[in-house]
Amino acid sequence: MPHPVAGRFGDFGGRYVPESLIPACAAVADAFTEAWADKTFRDELDNLLAVYAGRPTPLTPALNLGAQLGIALWLKREDLAHTGSHKINNVLGQALLARRMGRTRLIAETGAGQHGVATATAAALLGLSATVYMGTRDIERQRLNVHRMEMLGATVVPVTSGSRTLKDATNEAMRAWVADTDRAHFLLGSVGGPHPYPWMVREFQRVIGAEARRQASFTPDVVVACVGGGSNAAGTFAGFVDTPARLVGVEAAGGAAMSSGAPGVVHGARSMVLQDAEGQVAEAESIAAGLDYPGIGPEHAHLGAIGRAEYRTATDDEVVAAVGRLARTEGIICAFESAHAVAWVLRAAGTPDLPTGSAVVLTLSGRGDKDMR
């Protein structure tokens, strides 16, 4: 998956932002292009991922659950990375880039809080300040992560507009960036937003799929990951897109932009977006705060449009059941977000959609302690 031409993935992507943000986005694109070609930058990031974030994360065989389902199941354990999710991969990369650009402040959005925690962590490590925007509904249901962000020194700004979730937090974070582009870097947490973010975040998350491909002694039949904006899935898919493996992204049933949305623009990119009858962005609903988002990354929209990836859904009830099933069979408590992928495997195993004997690699994007309430 190369650099998208003009920030486009087929019919999707682009840079739909106010004129005042065009220079800031262009500066990030130029800086990332230069940094990604710089061995010194890449070596520093690789070292941090290894000695600080704890990479590589293991590819764990889920022997008990796999035997019950009649499949061979391996789990890519992003829940074991420092801060408890895949978010640290992208955040360390962008924080190093911000420092390289001379920025002293990180601005971020968060839903489940894992991206906010990772941003606060990187800011503390690199001597930067961090401001994290979070909807008040998500603050209520992810209180543990709010405490973690504040302990790490970040300022958490409650967002009371709209649905008080990730969409609205992203709106406010982008507005804050407009007012402080000379000093601040907008550290977007997923593969959405204006160019270069979908491409840049995928490249920082590519480590997931690259590791999993090296660790596997086989070519899986299916590679599956949960999808909200879709960074953990984009990083996972990047390692297998040139293989015969099926790529399956699993969205929240109440936030399924691929199956229930239409082409539109949200947060600076053209993608698949949930919309109402008037074409306005509709509200998403999910038990998983990180998937409570009305859009999807433009590269996912492209992969779906060309038939290279498939996008399915899981309901809240299926997700809760999946968390319990994985915990009782493998001793792993995963995040509600990750459990969407588990839920699809539980439903599909033994059917024509996932035949008996299939070899499956599933990315566990994060750990579930944040969801215990």
Image (cartoon, rainbow, N blue to C red):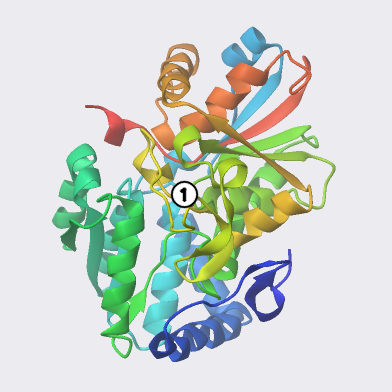
Asked if one can make out residue 180 in the rendered structure from this viewpoint, the answer is yes
Q: Quadrant of the C terminus?
A: top left
Please give the name of the residue rendered at 64% of the width and 36% of the height, measured from the top-left corner.
Answer: 224
Residue 240: horizontal and vertical position, in percent?
A: 74, 48
Looking at the image, which is closer to me, 215 or 142? 142
**Which of the 4 image quadrants contains residue 177?**
bottom left
Residue under label 1, please give it: 86
Determine whether, in the image, residue 296 is placed left or right of residue 154: right
Q: Amino acid at mark 1?
A: His
Q: Quadrant of the N terminus?
A: bottom right
At mark 1, the secondary structure is loop
Q: Characterize the local packing of mark 1: few (<14), some (14-19) or many (20 or more) Cα atoms within 10 angstroms.
A: many
Query: Residue reaching furthest top?
Result: 68
Q: State whether residue 188 is above or below residue 211.
A: below
Residue 345: horizontal and vertical position, in percent?
A: 62, 23
**Which of the 4 image quadrants contains residue 218?**
top right
Please give the name of the residue rendered at 81% of the width and 52% of the height, measured from the top-left corner.
Answer: 242
Determine whether, in the image, residue 118 is placed left or right of residue 259: left
Q: State whether residue 354 is above or below residue 283.
A: above
Residue 129: horizontal and vertical position, in percent?
A: 22, 73
